[in-house]
Amino acid sequence: MTLLARGAAVVIAGALVLPAPLIVADLISTNIYILADGEVQSEDASIAAEKVIVGGVIDGDLSVVASSVTITGTVKGDLLVASSGLVSITGTIEGSVRGAASQFVIDGDVQGDVTVAAMSLVSRGTIERDVLVFGNSIEMNGTVGRDVRGRVLTTTIGGTVGRDVDISTDTLTIESTADIGGDLTYRSPRLGHISGGATIVGLTTPITVGLSFPLSVYVSIATLVSWLGFLVGGLVITYLFRSTTVRATVFAEQHPFRSLGYGIVTIVVGATIGGALAVTLVGIPLSIALFALAVVAIAFAPLPILAAVGLRALRGRGGIVAGFLVGAIVLRVILALVPTLGVAIYVATVLMGVGSWVQGAWQQRSWSLPQPAPAVSIVGAATVDEPNGDVSNGDVSNGDSDESVNTE
């Protein structure tokens, strides 16, 4: 169990999932797996060990979690690997190589693609299809049958690339021995060093970027973390204020333009009140508190709009939570593909969201009066009855507070 637990930890670190339990062939110790020369593993192999050496033949896929991996034999399927150390391939991989490791060194033959995340990738062998790498450095001195793509800090190409090189990098070096059969496109804050003896059949296109590679990586990570934080925060808010969230979502779906108007008025009035408080000594603490509340409110203002959009896409199935997740993904895709349009849409969702939250909170306040009223399941459909905006078409219960709402 200790060995498998260690293997599982490395899998999580490498963001990989390995199928099947541990398969023991020639086991030297509990920490070393060896498939000796001449031996044949007649099916897929899943291995977790400190050190893995494959000198024989694996007639299928090899999934491995280890501190170091050495392959001098043949894997007739794919290699899926997670390693904290060196992955050395001097034999033959008839399929593709995918995984994460500190270092990949390929001196043998990979007949499929190579898709890896690594501190460094060094290839002096043959990769018959594409290379996609994310990491610190890449050094291609062998042969690549098709494209080389990736995002790395340092790029050196001295071998043969059958088609295009398209890479984001901080430093690019094309050596005199390089032979690129297609276009060379690189994104970098500085011009790359291209030796005069290098052969580039297609166009060479340098694209200057404002951020250095490390900083751009940090920005990308920060963007991803902030988006995940938005998802988690949205789910928490949906749970804590589930009844108000339902009302705000219903109002946003049925009255988008009124939501927009309410949102603009709320922001203008809030800014006016905050400014007035800020000029008085007594009002400064209140102004600061109001500003902090406004930041949080604006950050999660799009929630009802995104939930409404997601529910429309799901045709009312899945409830508020599923609708919010779908809507958030749609917005993220738009921001990534069409940034200008995405920003305009995001601003609109913030304004409309503020208005729908205000209306949802107002309806919730009205429901605080001791009167029987229907409640809405957070996973069910809902409508708003005009003119007083009561929510209906849900499970019936006494809606005295957020906690009274059925959350099936």
Image (cartoon, rainbow, N blue to C red):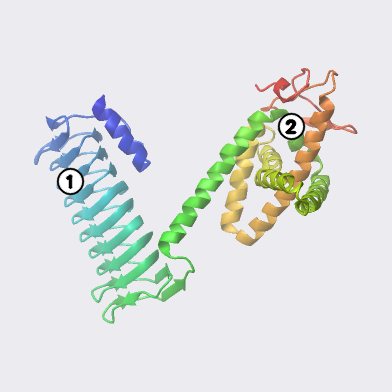
**Residue 389 visible in image:** yes
Q: Is residue 153 left or right of residue 385?
A: left
Q: Amino acid at mark 2?
A: Thr
The residue lying furthest to the right in this view is 387
**Residue 253 visible in image:** no
Instruction: In the rendered view, tell whether residue 275 sits above or below residue 193.
Output: above
Q: Position of residue 331 (x, y in %)?
A: 62, 49
The residue lying furthest to the front in this view is 281
Mark 2 or mark 1: which comes first in sequence? 1
Residue drawn 82% across the image and 21% down it: 373
Marking on residue 70: 1
Marking on residue 244: 2
Q: Position of residue 181 (x, y in %)?
A: 33, 71
Residue drawn 24% across the image and 29% down it: 3
Quadrant containing the N terminus is top left
Nearer to us: label 2 or label 1: 2
Label 1, secondary structure: give it: strand
Q: Position of residue 21 (x, y in %)?
A: 28, 28
Q: Amino acid at mark 1?
A: Thr
Q: Quadrant of residue 42?
A: top left
Instruction: In the rendered view, tell whether residue 239 sits above or below residue 101.
Output: above
Within 10 Å of disc 2 (Cα), the crowding (few <14, some 14-19, many 20+) is many
Q: Position of residue 195 (x, y in %)?
A: 28, 79
Quadrant containing the C terminus is top right
Q: Is residue 109 left or right of residue 113?
A: left
Front-lying residue, 261 or 396: 261
| Disc 2 to disc 1: CB gap under 8 Å | no
Q: Quadrant of residue 303?
A: top right
Label 2, secondary structure: give it: helix
The residue lying furthest to the bottom in this view is 196
